[in-house]
Amino acid sequence: MNYIIKICCVALFSITAVHAQKTEVDSSLVITGDKGVISEVSKTDTVQAFKRFKADGVAAVIGDYLILETDIVKMREDVKNQGMDSDEISDCQLAGRLMENKLYAHHAVQDSTINVSEDEINNMIGQQMDRMVQQIGSMEKLLEFYRKENERDLRAELFVINKERALSDRMQSKIVSEIEVTPEEVRQFFDRIPEDERPQFGDEVKISQLVIEPDVPEEEEQKVVDQLTEMRNDIVENGASFATKAVLYSQDATSTKGGQMTITRKDPLDKDFKQVAFSLQEGEVSKPFKSSFGYHIIQLDKVRGEKLDIRHIIIMPKVTEETIKIAREKLDTIRRSIVNNKISFDEAARRYSDEEETRGDGGKLINPKTGDTRFELTDIDPLIYDKVNNLNEGEVSMILIDQTRTGSKFFKIIIVDNKYKAHIANYAQDYTKIKELALREKQIKAIEKWQKEKIGNTYVKIGDEYKDCAFSGNWLKQ
């Protein structure tokens, strides 16, 4: 394994970097409260627990946490479900990864600065179960998959899994939170890579876009407001069912559940939506209001501490054929002005683009993976890959049709600002990527140092079946 692979491939079963995603689907604690809350236990209790559960197949105990043989089996199944070749991964590697996660979680519990609230985990579970039900087809199938008799038991198990995962994530984040690399450290890192082992970066581009959205006529917006007002009056004055109206008319995924949602102030929702929801009294139905997604009414069912149980209906006003035609003609005029050098793409985007996120920077797109303006061609949206790939540097695309998250269509043009051919890493040209690799190496070293220290002062008991494993950490304390 060459030098750069050692740094880039922070594998699933070795030292875990800060942003590594944990995918194991089961874990068990020595003791849990009625709601799955992690409980404090003494080392003596943990030793007794190891003996008590030995017949059930305990692979290891790390601090207050057990690793069962079934955890390893389920983790292998999960790896297989991700499309990886699980036959090439040993039980020792799986056990080692699980032990690392338990170590993080155990010390997160001891750290008073790390907090994971019950509300946060329950909200996470709600979203998780909604996604899983949507993927698998029904709650009955989901319960069968998890071998649970009812939803309450499934939620209890998911609480334990997600609590541990959140603790582990935050402990890792804290370990590396203050780690930075200086330009000199980046230079030294690059110079240490043998020339014949320096990474090759694929074809890359810098692109900008200019977006024009069809206007929604005022009369269409008023139609929606009137429709929602009529619904609200029927609910408030005649006792009509909010849930039934949500099923019949709401235009989002919650309609199948009668518009039901549980939200907190920390949820990444539209700010106007949250402001209205948290201004209501129990049983109250809001008047129609506008968010960035459409027009809503909300009913507050119940206040539970910092959480709200609500129902909502959303209807999105429609654009018309006339406004679609006007938007396309507007963009065509702008494009011709750019192509004929009457205005630069940068200036046109700043002046005319309807996309707030990019307008202020002349339409330049930011790669969410790197925070840089360069994209590897393989990272570009498949819908526009061919268009970008076939453009020359400085060339403007024809008008493209795209759509928002809510399905509303809009028009855009793209320009390729720069093209970079596949090449061996160059310090000046690829500084951002090299810096990321140098930072990752430094984070890994910090994690290794932390693990070495914590393994030494944490209660660890390894089952006989795993005492011959060549773990990356000194889990056997030899």
Image (cartoon, rainbow, N blue to C red):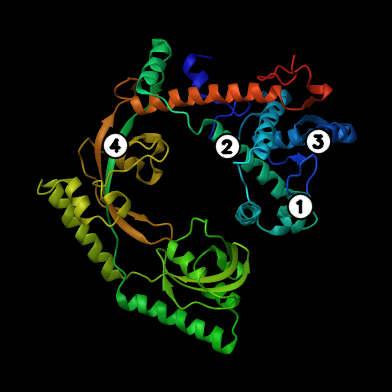
Q: Nearer the viewer, mark 2 or mark 3?
A: 3
Taking depth in this image into account, of 43 and 331 the one nearest to the observer is: 43
Q: Secondary structure at mark 1?
A: helix
Residue topped by disc 2: 21
Q: Is residue 390 above or below residue 443?
A: below
In the picture, measured across the screen, residue 63 lies left or right of residue 447, that is right
Neighbour class for label 4 at 10 Å: few (<14), some, many (≥20)?
A: many
Q: Earlier in the sequence, mark 1 or mark 3?
A: 3
Instruction: Decide if residue 171 is in sight here.
Output: yes
Q: Earlier in the sequence, mark 4 or mark 2?
A: 2
- Please tell me whether mark 4 or mark 3 is closer to you in this view: 3
The residue lying toward the viewer, choosing from 153 and 440, is 440
- The residue type indicated by label 2 comes to Gln
Helix, strand or loop at mark 4: strand
Q: Residues within 10 Å of mark 2 (few under 14, many from 20)?
A: few
At mark 3, the secondary structure is loop
Viewer-proximal residue among 419 and 57: 57
**Which label number is shown at residue 144?**
1
Residue 460 in the image: x percent, y percent?
76, 26
Separation (CA) of disc 2 from disc 3: 30 Å
User: As displayed, is residue 274 above or below residue 30?
Assistant: below
Question: Distance of mark 1 from mark 3, alpha carbons?
Answer: 36 Å
